Amino acid sequence: MSEPLLQAVDLQCERDDRELFRALNFTIAAGTLTRVEGPNGSGKTTLLRILAGLNDSFSGRLLWQGEPRDARREEFLRNLLYIGHRPGIKPLLTPIENLRGLLAGRQQVADTVLRQALEGTGLAGYQDVPCRNLSAGQQRRVALARLLISDEPLWILDEAFTALDFHGVEGLERLLVERAANGGAVVVTTHHDLRLPDIHRIVLGATAVAGDHGATCQQAGEAHAH
Amino acid sequence: MPTDSSVRVRPLTAGPGVMAAMVAVVRRDLQASFRQRQDLLNPLLFFIMVVTLFPLGVSPEVSFLQQAGTGILWVAALLATLLSLDHLYRHDFDDGTLEQLMLQPQPLYLLILAKVLAHWLVTGLPLVLLAPLLGVMVHLEGNSIGILCLTLLIGTPVLSLIGSIGAALTLGLRSGGVLLSLLIIPLYIPVLIFGTGTVAAAAEGAPVSAYIALMGAFLVLALTLAPFASAAALRISMSNS
């Protein structure tokens, strides 16, 4: 396997005087699928936002291809596709306009490609309908259409499977596996029961349940069949 | 969801330039604004109402209005801008597009500048364009109206730029409106003083180039520093959300 894209060293994060995790070490290598696990409130979203660079309130080091991430921020962001809880879709704009806006600074993509991507996510015929008239699942699909076009090697997807129907979930699972097989790195959180082989796991909040404050991390490197 | 499985994924080193990203931000913001017209009209209507109600409430006499007219227009423009500021980042924050903006590989400084430009185009610029009409209504002389428009043209971008700092700082708060006003109004005062001072000087026949130069200095200062401050404020708000 190739060198790690992203490496976390001794990450620690507190939120509202509560320690979410500490001494968290893991690597995210190209060609791997990583799932962040833990109960509600264990800091999954916070961890993903820290990795993406949206949350700066942590201690520890993050390395992008072996060098400090913040020193190579522009290059890091160029290589990152993050889709959060809030999918980044403007309700007043149509799916096509939304995608155009989201991709303008990242890739030059022709409108026909955008339309194909939207069709690929099952939104044929909805390309020019304002997103506020679409259902939650459909809006999610607009955001996920970016995955079909994306050339970024690192994907960070927060609650990627939320609001998707059965076929959507299946399609997305397949897409993530293919992506990893092609050399992309994928980090996801989900409560959905993923049936993916060779998935890496980062477990948060494991000891918090037992009453011990502070979550631990077990992870990385070892693959669990799920 | 089918995908082209033949392509290997590799780290990227280059992508579209800064200009393309900025143009896209402006275009998207304008598109969104024009689909939500009441948000667009609100500050304008406020501006018109204050300026029309003032003579009715205080005095419709020509001598009074000629004296107070500039101040009325400037204060109304300032408050109208303040009224529109909360929308600058709020919608983007709620729907997640702000996150995506901050994750773009281009410098956040320039992307914020593009956002403020879009904001000014839909709030500040219409105020400047309406000002001559309202200037005539409060009996300002032709020369004064020209100078008034010039000061508004230089001044309203400063208001938008300074306002973006406050809007970014109060983003994480539930009801940031009051705090936003308290934070921003003191910073607006110099712009107001020099804006109205320029027109007063012109009405007395004094040279105004020094005033205009000072306002230009305000604009340059705001252009260079406000996006930095806004970017820092946005990062703080984002970290706490």
Image: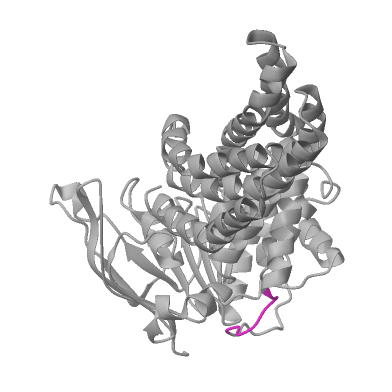
Residue B37 visible to an observer of this rendering: yes
Quarter of the figure with residue A91 = top right
Left or right relative to B19: residue A67: left
> Front-most of B17 and A63?
B17
Q: Assign the magenta stretch its main secondary structure.
A: loop
Left or right relative to B67: residue A118: right
Left or right relative to B195: residue A55: left
Quarter of the figure with residue A121 = bottom right
Magenta-tinted stretch:
B11-17
Quarter of the figure with residue B32 = top right
Q: Position of residue B227 (x, y in %)?
A: 53, 59
- The N terminus of chain B appears in which quarter of the rendering? bottom right
Residue A148 visible to an observer of this rendering: no
Q: Is residue B109 above or below residue B72?
A: below
Q: Is residue A206 above or below residue B93?
A: below
The residue drawn where x is 73% and y is 69% is B20
Q: Position of residue B184 (x, y in %)?
A: 46, 40
> Front-most of B138 and B131?
B138
Q: Position of residue A108 (x, y in %)?
A: 76, 73
Total marks in image:
0
- Looking at the image, the residue that sits furthest to the left is A212
